Image (cartoon, rainbow, N blue to C red):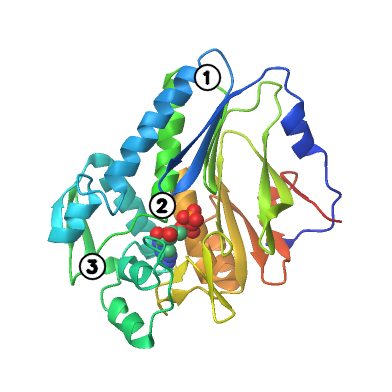
């Protein structure tokens, strides 16, 4: 892991916005509580985007906590049941990452999301008693998966909010590819999946939000045929009595993670993994995340700390440009 030196802002972003003679098709929809923009080039772009959109809506219904006809709502109500192969795949990846990250990622944070009001956007600071009560039901070890059969023990309930967007962005990319699209970008909130490169042969340039000023970019990252998922403390946040509270919960304390990091991006080929990993590494903090990366070197990462200092893995060389020298 190394600190990035000062680099001049390249014209990459500008180039991305204005260099293509070939105009893309683009559409924004709302799914999984976030804006999803699909950009695609080529003659099949419009049809591809339409099919990708349907796929995203379908998966949103399947994996949402609040849809009575999906997989998760009935499971959380009854404590056991069969789910679709797709939901089972997401739960399997979630549990794999929970185990490898020693619980920093935990898909049973559900009662904590409720206690803090992040579910349903009814934000509030819960009492210590409420947090202790909610923590009784948190623990990925309470989830067992046998094929597509899921059992939730000790009152555990699933929340796939930290991973489902990654899965859905890959599913949308699959649909686009099946429609013959070879150049596209699926921006699923802060999980971004690139298919190929832009038609002019350049990569896709992604603005990395400045945690201290999220409407601005702090750096520009170039990706092609891979994905980038960012978990940031600025993404869903509320203020009470002068303190800010964000939506990435430390399953150990039951409170918004205060790990010294304000943003973690994971860049790799698998968006499902990237989505869960960015959440996990955020909760771990820089030191543990660095150790984790030593043991799992199949991804690259960018970290921003509370001082707004950026560090990244060596594989990001040539892929990231800082905005301010
Ligand atoms: P975003 O949803 O903004 O892309 P993340 O990918 O980091 O951000 O996921 C945050 C979401 O994940 C929360 O809204 C919640 O549903 C869930 N979540 C929060 N904390 C954790 C955690 N420690 N482990 C697993 N899921 C979490
Ligand atoms: Mg995530």
Contact between labelled residues 3 and 2, with CB atoms less than 8 Å apart? no
Residue lying farthest bottom? 129
Residue lying farthest top? 43
Q: With respect to residue 315, does 251 lie above or below?
A: below
Q: Which mark is residue 241?
A: none
Q: With respect to residue 82, does 129 lie above or below?
A: below
The picture places residue 230, in percent across and down from the top left corner, at 56, 53
- Where does the C terminus fall, quadrant-wise? bottom right
Q: Which mark is residue 45?
A: 1
Q: Which mark is residue 163?
A: 2
The picture places residue 270, in percent across and down from the top left corner, at 47, 43
Q: Residues within 10 Å of mark 2 (few under 14, many from 20)?
A: many
Contact between labelled residues 3 and 1, with CB atoms less than 8 Å apart? no
Q: CA distance from mark 1 to mark 2?
A: 26 Å
Q: Residues within 10 Å of mark 3 (few under 14, many from 20)?
A: many
Q: Is mark 2 within 8 Å of ligand 2?
A: yes
- Where does the N terminus fall, quadrant-wise? bottom right
Looking at the image, tell me whether mark 1 or mark 2 is earlier in sequence order: 1
Q: Nearer the viewer, residue 107 or 281?
A: 107
Q: With respect to residue 278, does 201 lie above or below?
A: above
Q: Which mark is residue 156?
A: 3
Looking at the image, tell me whether mark 1 or mark 3 is earlier in sequence order: 1
Q: With respect to residue 196, does 247 lie above or below?
A: below
């Amino acid at each position: 892991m190394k600190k990035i030196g000062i680099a001049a802002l390249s014209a990459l972003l500008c180039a991305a916005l204005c260099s293509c003679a070939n105009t893309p098709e683009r559409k924004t929809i709302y799914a999984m509580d976030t804006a999803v923009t699909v950009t695609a080039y080529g003659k099949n772009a419009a049809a591809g985007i339409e099919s990708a959109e349907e796929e995203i809506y379908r998966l949103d219904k399947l994996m949402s906590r609040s849809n009575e006809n999906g997989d998760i709502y009935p499971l959380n109500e009854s404590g056991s049941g069969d789910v679709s192969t797709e939901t089972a795949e997401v739960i399997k990846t979630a549990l794999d990452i929970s185990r490898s990250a020693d619980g920093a990622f935990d898909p049973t944070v559900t009662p904590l999301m409720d206690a803090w009001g992040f579910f349903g956007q009814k934000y509030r600071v819960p009492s210590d008693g409420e947090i202790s009560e909610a923590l009784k039901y948190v623990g990925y070890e309470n989830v067992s998966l046998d094929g597509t059969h899921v059992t939730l023990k000790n009152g555990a309930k699933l929340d796939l909010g930290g991973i489902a967007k990654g899965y859905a962005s890959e599913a949308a990319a699959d649909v686009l590819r099946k429609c013959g699209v070879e150049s596209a970008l699926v921006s699923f909130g802060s999980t971004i999946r690139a298919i190929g490169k832009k038609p002019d042969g350049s990569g896709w340039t992604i603005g990395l939000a400045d945690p201290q000023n999220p409407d601005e970019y702090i750096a520009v990252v170039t990706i092609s045929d891979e994905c980038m998922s960012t978990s940031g403390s600025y993404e869903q946040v509320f203020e009470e009595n002068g303190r800010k509270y964000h939506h990435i919960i430390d399953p150990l304390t039951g409170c918004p993670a205060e790990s010294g990091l304000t943003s973690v991006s994971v860049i790799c080929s698998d968006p499902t993994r990237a989505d869960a990993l960015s959440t996990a590494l955020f909760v771990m903090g820089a030191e543990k995340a660095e150790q984790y990366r030593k043991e799992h070197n199949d991804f690259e990462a960018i970290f921003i700390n509370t001082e707004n200092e950026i560090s990244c893995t060596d594989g990001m060389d040539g892929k990231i440009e800082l905005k301010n020298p």
